[in-house]
Image (cartoon, rainbow, N blue to C red):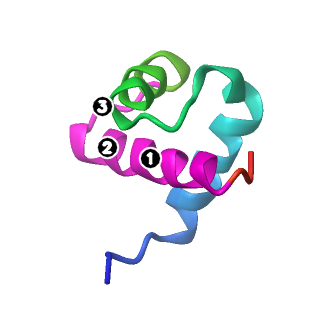
């Protein structure tokens, strides 16, 4: 089982996907770069968590 993501991270990821959904794909490495362009996130760990959750949502075709 994976780690549980907080409501703040989930809502931030959904907001980024709603605004910049065309930049994201099912590839984690591309999504890391897209998160850097779409939002100003200073922490590498938070960037990776958001990129991973965005990848998961794209694979599930939610956004």
Type of secondary structure dominating the magenta stretch: helix
Q: Is residue 47 left or right of residue 35?
A: left
Among numbered discs 2 and 3, the one appearing first in the sequence: 3
Residue 58: which disc? none
- Please report the residue visible at 74 percent of the width from the left and 53 percent of the height from the top: 62
Location of residue 26 with respect to 4 vertically, above or below: above
Q: Nearer the viewer, mark 2 or mark 3?
A: 2
Is residue 12 at least partly visible in the picture?
A: no
The residue that disc 1 covers is 50
- Please say if the residues under marks 2 and 3 sit with CB atoms less than 8 Å apart: no
The residue that disc 2 covers is 48
Q: Is residue 53 magenta?
A: yes
Crowdedness near tag 1: few (<14), some (14–19) or many (≥20) residues, C-alpha within 10 Å: many
> Which element is circle 3 on?
loop
Location of residue 57 with respect to 15 vertically, above or below: below
CA distance separating discs 2 and 3: 11 Å
Among numbered discs 1 and 3, the one appearing first in the sequence: 3
- Please report the residue visible at 46 percent of the width from the left and 28 percent of the height from the top: 35
- Please say if the residues under marks 2 and 1 sit with CB atoms less than 8 Å apart: yes
Magenta stretch, residue numbers = 40-60
> Which element is circle 1 on?
helix
Residue 42: which disc? 3
């Amino acid at each position: 089982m994976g780690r549980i993501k907080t409501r703040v991270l989930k809502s931030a990821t959904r907001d980024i996907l709603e605004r910049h959904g065309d930049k994201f794909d099912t590839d984690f490495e591309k999504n890391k770069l897209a998160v850097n362009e779409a939002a100003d996130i200073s922490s590498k760990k938070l960037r990776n968590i958001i990129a991973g959750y965005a990848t998961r949502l794209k694979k599930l075709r939610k956004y």
